Each structure stands twice: as structure tokens, then as C-alpha cells.
Image (spheres, grey):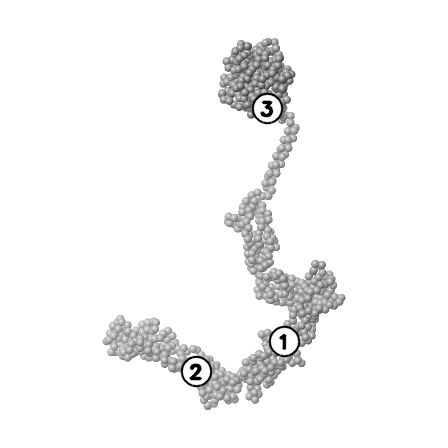
Amino acid sequence: MGTAWMLRNLVVIIHLSAYFGLCTILRSCGYIIPEISIIQIGTQFVASCVLNESCIPVYGADANYIYWSTRKNEVPKEQYNVVNRTLAQVTFTDTSVLESPLLCSILEHGQIPRTLYGIFFTLGFPPEKPTNLTCIVYQDVGMTCTWNPGRHTYLPTNFTLKNQWFAEQKPDCIPFDANNSCTIEAEHFSFFVNTELWVEVENGLGKNESDHIFLDPVNIVKPRAPDILNVTAIPELPSGLKVEWENPYREQEMKLKFVIRYRMKYSINFTELPSEDTASNRNFFTLQGLKSFTTYSISIRCMKMDGRGYWSEWSTEVTGTTPETKPSKKVDLWRQLTYNNSGKRNLELMWKKLEVSDANGIILFYEVKISSKATETVITPNTTLRYQLEDKKYTVNVYACNSVGKSPVATLIIPEESAPVLPGVPHFNVTSNNTHLLLEWKAPRFSVNGYIIECVDLLSEKRVIEWQQLESTARSAVIYENIKQFKLYEVSIYPLYNGNPGASHTLKTYLEEGAPLNGPDIVAHKIDKNEVTLVWKLLHPEDQRGFITHYAVVYSPNNGRDSFNVTVDANITECTLSSLTKDTSYLTYLVAFTSKGGTPGRKFTFTTLKYANGEIEAIIVPVCLFFLIFSLTAVLLCFKKINMIKKHVWPNVPDPSNSTVAQWSPQSIMQSCGKEPVCPENTITAVSVVEPDPDDKSKLAEQDGTVLSLEENSGSEDHSSGIGGSSCSSTPRQSVSDSEEGESAQSTSSSVQYSTVVASSYRGQLPSVHVFARSESTQPLLDSEERSEDLHSERSMEGSDNSPQGRHYFRQNCCSHEATVGSLHSAGLNTVSQTVYENSLVGLNHLQMLSHSSGSLEFSPAIKENEELEATPDSLQQNNDGQTVVSLDLLGLQRARESGEPKSYLPQSVKQSGYMPQ
């Protein structure tokens, strides 16, 4: 320590020399007193800086310009004290704040700092008194003493162990590396001699020593551990082992006592023999009461027999195995009952292997005896056995066999199917603490000889049954093997009544619950206007990870403004949401909850109906019923009032095809003639119409008397009506309208055309213009009208028989006698072309030939018999059916007028008409 301290001071001096310049020059100008290297922590320290008188003129400053500083900080001026012009002091009340080095400096010429001198120092404490000096004599090593050095001094400190026998001083013991212990070699102490021991300590601030102790080294001996020589089995004593060892001291040197401990090979707990069993000095011992065919680890230690000194360390463990004996414990036996396809019971026997300490050897096989009326014995090396049962009571006995003998019998009774079940435990509870399952129950009223605990993992595909058998006094059990968190287990307990199982008590539990992995998927079962029924399926047990406590149905409109939820019990799988808004889309999902939290399922969207189910039907059905009833009522009224309705809505219309006019055809004419017609095909009777003056219109009406008219009912005004009929077929001819533009007027071959004929006309009046008019009436020919026309026609004809002017004949060279000129309508003649002038008389009477009874119609005799009316080629045209239509030729009438023959002009109005047969 001293050498290291001197080297350190030398290094400090070298650094100071480099820092301050030449040491001799600095010495000549100033120095610090006291110049010490160690300062005690917590004490007051005063340092003085002495300035050389000769340096004052050089520096231009005296002691008033001296200032102090440490390594990092300048000392406050409050701690300065200037004694005179060459001496300045500084005072430190607490040296714990000092930092080496301490420097004395001066301000040269009042402003230039220059260091005069400095010192390096170490802070520390003086040594304290060592305490708790203890010494032990280790066999074959020496006497080792240890002590408590006290607080740390922060300074180099030296310890010395002093050893003195009476007045004889022994060599000092210097510890190595400040271990606070030191070993005195054996030759420097002796047994049975009192020895004085103490410790001295010293550093730069002082020295100290411990209390002196006096002892005999023989009383502080710690022997070495005995060496175990053998551990052997004793055939005559299957439960014992003989242990032999070697003592560390001969009996003459020191008598010892021993402690022996042992444990099974794979156990951590030792068993120690009582000290009184091994109190005497010995070198062997026999352990008894051990388990057969079991390996034990044995160790031993010793100390002085009178109890003074110290126990030796435990010896190295040595193993030994006890001899094999027959098993000392019966096997744990249980069963599982199942049913096959034929309805018979299948028995699966299960038993557990014996512990090594209970097997007392190597189990070679198991002997199973199944007894009903007869006994069947099965030898198997396995721990399971399958057997098919009848509906009988069976007793099963199982033995575990080794090379020495059999174990005690394990018995199990299988009752008949119809046998009453024995009572189970009245109370059973299972709790979990996240590491194991704790089972607690109450015993039945009847005496039992054991319990069977079953634990089944319900989520495992194999459904392996973990079970254990407990004593009859057990009221609780712990299951900690092969169980995991978030798994569902089914735990059952069966009391055993002399091997006959009672009723089971079963509970389901989790080692540790968690939130579900996911929530159920939700679907809409029934959607209505203001409500919806949502259904879902229960979660799979693997996804539950705990007991489902409840569900929460969360729903909200798609606008996301509001959110609602409905709580549903865990055993319910549907929920009806009501008070919804019609024709609105909703977003919903289901949250499944356990005691550890909830997990939502997938989201589902549905839209409520605009109308409730049956609402449209409730409106449509009454309306339809109303219309049905109304229709039926109307039909019934129509049937009841059919005649009145027919009279006002659709009067009887005769079929023109069956009328007399329909008979006016070339065929009828030829029949009336009795021979072929001699008229050329292109020859038709020309009709002349005289247009009376408007002033004479009234006169005409008075002279003519009754005017017969037939009005036609036709669906189209464009169909032309013809006057009279021709025995020769002719094609329709285009008529000239009053606007001098040609219009095509056609009628079907089935139409019947009508015209009106005025019975009398002005005599001797020659119109300057030939006017042809057609009937535009579309009124159908009614029965009343037909009859009325016939009447008028007959009267007109009767009135004209007496006067030559009253009868007008229209002759046609068809036969030798007067041919009756019918209607111009025929199979080949559909239209009559006519020219209507703008100044034609609007009120002209219609010209019509009437002769229903005789089949002929006569006109003025001014028209000669056998007068032929020739058709000009211009009057021949083709209709759409390919038939020839002949127009009324005015040339024939003109030639008749030029020849001077009397002429008769009949005012007429011809309207287009057509009638479809009904």
C-alpha cells in the first residue's frame, strides 16, 4: 500500500511541475501551508498561501490580490481572510465538497491571473474498530478467521491478524486482497492450547484494533465429510439398505457423531435419521422401512461428539436399490359402458399403472377375472380390456403381478341394466384459478370406499377420458394435467360403494375463459313493414372460448344517425325488431358475450317493406269484390231489363242481304225475263236528274206528294250508292266530287246500296246542267222504315196511274216487255260516279226505284221503250277486284234530247251507302 501511495504522489508532483513551470521559481514566489495529502471527510480545513516579499514588486500585487480555486470551481470570497500583505487564508467548514487540487493564484498587475502554488490531496475516513472476529479449524487446511472491517475508508487500509499463545507471539497473518479473512497454518497453532487472537487496522488518518478473543482450536473444528464406501441391499430385509463409510478422524484423535439422510432417486425431499440413532462413533448403518424395489440416494455428515465445533459438509450422494417384493397397492380400476348396433353393452375396463414405489418390482402382466355365473380369466400386459356383456350382473377383479407375487385385488361391479342406480354426491362444485381445476364435493349419506373423477375434453375429436381414483376420505381434488385454457371440459364424480359406482354428478367448466373468437352470423327470417325477425345459429364450442352469457343485437339505419341494441338470452336464437321505419335499409350484427367480453359477428343489411304483408291485398280484395258484386248486379239488371236496353242501345236492324233490295240483281232480272239478257255488258241505264229552282222547291214537294225515301246505314261515307241495277256486270267508276277532284269510292261486294226516287218531277223543264247526286246516309234500313217506304211507294204509284204525267218509266232493252230497272247495285257494279255541282240543290229529293211487289219500277213514258243507253269507254274502269265499273253516261240522255224525244228529269239525291250482313 505504501509503495503505491508514493508512486501516486510522485505523479502528482510531476504534473504540478508541468502545470506551474519550474518548481524552484514558483517556490521563490509563494507556497501553501499545510501541505498535506490526506484530508478527513467532514472536518474543517484551513489553508494559507504565503507570498514572497520579493515578488510583490514583480507582480505589482500583494496578498489582497490572491484568490483560491479547486479543480472545477472558484472558492467564494466570503471564505477568504487576508492576514497581511504576504499571507492570505481560506477556510472550508465541510471538506466533503472539496475537489483536488487546491490552487492559490494572484492577479498580476491587478488583472492578469497567475497561479502561485497548488496541492493534491485525498479525502477519506480513519479506520473503524473491526468486529465479529470468528475462527474455524478446517481439517487438513488450518485455522481461518474472519471479521467485519467496518465502514469503507476510501483510503489504503492495512489489516493484520495477531496470534499469541500465552506470552509467545506467533507470526502475523496478512490477508490477501482485503478479503477480511486470514488462515493460520496448522503448525502455528495447537489443539488443547488457549490461543489469543485479534485484528489490527491502519491507514493515513490513523489505526485501530478489534477485541481480543481466547479459544481452544479443538473446539472450533469442522471435520471433512465422511466418504461413503457402499450402499447394499439385504435379501433378508427387503425394506432395508446397509450404508458403510470412512470417518475423517480416527477415534483416538476425535470421536464423532453422524447424521444420515436419504430420498427416493427422483424426489427432492430428504428424510433424516434421528441424531440419537447415530450418536455413537461408527462407520456403518442399516436403513429400514424403505419401499421395496426402490432406488434411494444417501448422504452423511459428522461433527465432534460433544457437540462443540461445526458439522461437516454433506458427503457425495450414493444410490442403492431395495430388493423386489410383491406389489403393495391395488391398481386404480374404472370402466366405460357403450352400446353396439345390436343393443348389447360393451365394457371397456381401464386401470392405471402402479407407481414404482407401489409396484415393488417390475410388473410383468395383469390378471383380470370377470365373474357372472361363471368366471373368465384374462391375462394381458395392457392396461385396458374390452368385453361384451349380457344383461347380467358382473364382478371384475384385477391383479398386478411381478416376479414375486400379486398386488391386492381391485374390484369393480357392473350391475344389470334394470338395476337401480345408487345415489351420487349431494353437492359438487368446480372452480378454476387459471392453472388448475379445483373440485369440491360433499360425501353421500351412505358409506363409500372411494371416488372416481372423470375429466373429458369436449372439443377433442378423440374425447380422451382423464380419470383418477381417490380415497373415501377425500372431499376435494385438483386437476392440473392435460388441461388448457379456452377449452371446454366435462367433469364428473362417481362415488364407489364397495366397487359399485353410484350416480354421476357432471359439470361443464373452462380452465380459463376468453372472449369469443367471433360472433354468430345473422340472417333475416321474416321482413315486414315495421318489424323483422332475425335468426342465428349457436356458436361452435371451439369459437365460444367460454360460457355465452347473452347476445346483443345491434342495428342502425344506413344513415348511421342512431344505433340501437337489444339484449337476448344465451339460449335464444332469434329476435324480433319492431318499431322500424318502413322502406328503410338497416345495418345489423350480433355480439356474443362471455364473462371476459364480447365479439361481434359479420354485418348484415336488410330493408323493411314499403307495405305490410297483406296490406295491398286488404285494399285490392275489397275493391275487386265491389266491382264483382257491381258487375253481377249490372248483369242481373241487364237480363231483367233486356228488352228496354235493346230498344235504346241496339235496336233490331234487318239484314239487308235478306231484304227485297238485295234481290235486285242481274240474276233476278234474268229470271224474270226467263232468258239470257240481250244487253251488252257495257250498257247501263243512264239516270238524268233535273235540278229544280229553289223557288220551285216547295211546289215540287206539293205536286209530288209523298216522297219515299230509303236511308242507308253504313260504316263508311266513302262507299258510293247506286241507283237502279243493270243486267250487265260493270266495274265501279270514279265519281267526281263537288270540288272537281276525283275521289275513289269503293264498297265491298257484300254491301247493299240505297237511293231515293222522287215519284214526280217538273214536266217540260230542261236543266241546263246534268246533276248527279248520291245518298250520303249511313242509317241502317229498319223494319219500320222499310215498311213505310213500301207504303209510300204504293201510294205514289197508285196516284200516277191515272195521269200520263204521273207515271214515269225508265225503259231498258232487256226484254220485249218493260224491264224493271232496279238498283244499280249488283255483283259487278259497286259504285256510281256522279258529278255534283256547287250550286246543286241541297234539298233535292232522292231518286229511288220502288217496286217490291211486282219487281219493276216505272218512270216517265218520255223515255222510249227499247231505248239503249250506251256506255262510253271513258266510263269503264277497273276496281281493286279486277271488275269493270260503268259510270252513268250522260251521252245517251243528250242524244235522246237532241232527237226531239220527250224527256223526263227526275230530281234525285244519291248517297254513298254500304251495309255489311249481320
Residue indicated by mark 3: 749
Structural crowding at the residue carrying mark 2, measured as other residues with C-alpha within 10 Å and reported as few (<14), some (14–19) or many (≥20): many
Q: Position of residue 174 (x, y in %)?
A: 44, 84
Q: Looking at the image, which is closer to me, 134 or 517?
A: 517
Residue indicated by mark 2: 159
Residue indicated by mark 1: 294
Q: Looking at the image, which is closer to me, 748 or 767?
A: 748
Structural crowding at the residue carrying mark 1, measured as other residues with C-alpha within 10 Å and reported as few (<14), some (14–19) or many (≥20): many
Outermost left residue = 57
Q: Position of residue 407 (x, y in %)?
A: 68, 73
Image vertical order of residue 793 relative to residue 750, above or below? above
* Label 3: which secondary element: loop
* Label 2: which secondary element: strand
Distance between mark 2 and mark 3 Cα atoms: 159 Å
The residue lying at 64 percent from left, 22 percent from top is: 658
Nearer to us of marks 2 and 3 is 3
- Quadrant location of the C terminus in the rendered image: top right
Q: Position of residue 417 (x, y in %)?
A: 72, 61
Amino acid under label 1? Answer: Thr
Residue 121 location, quadrant: bottom left
Can residue 697 be seen in this snapshot? no
Residue 677 location, quadrant: top right
Q: Looking at the image, which is closer to me, 338 or 532?
A: 338
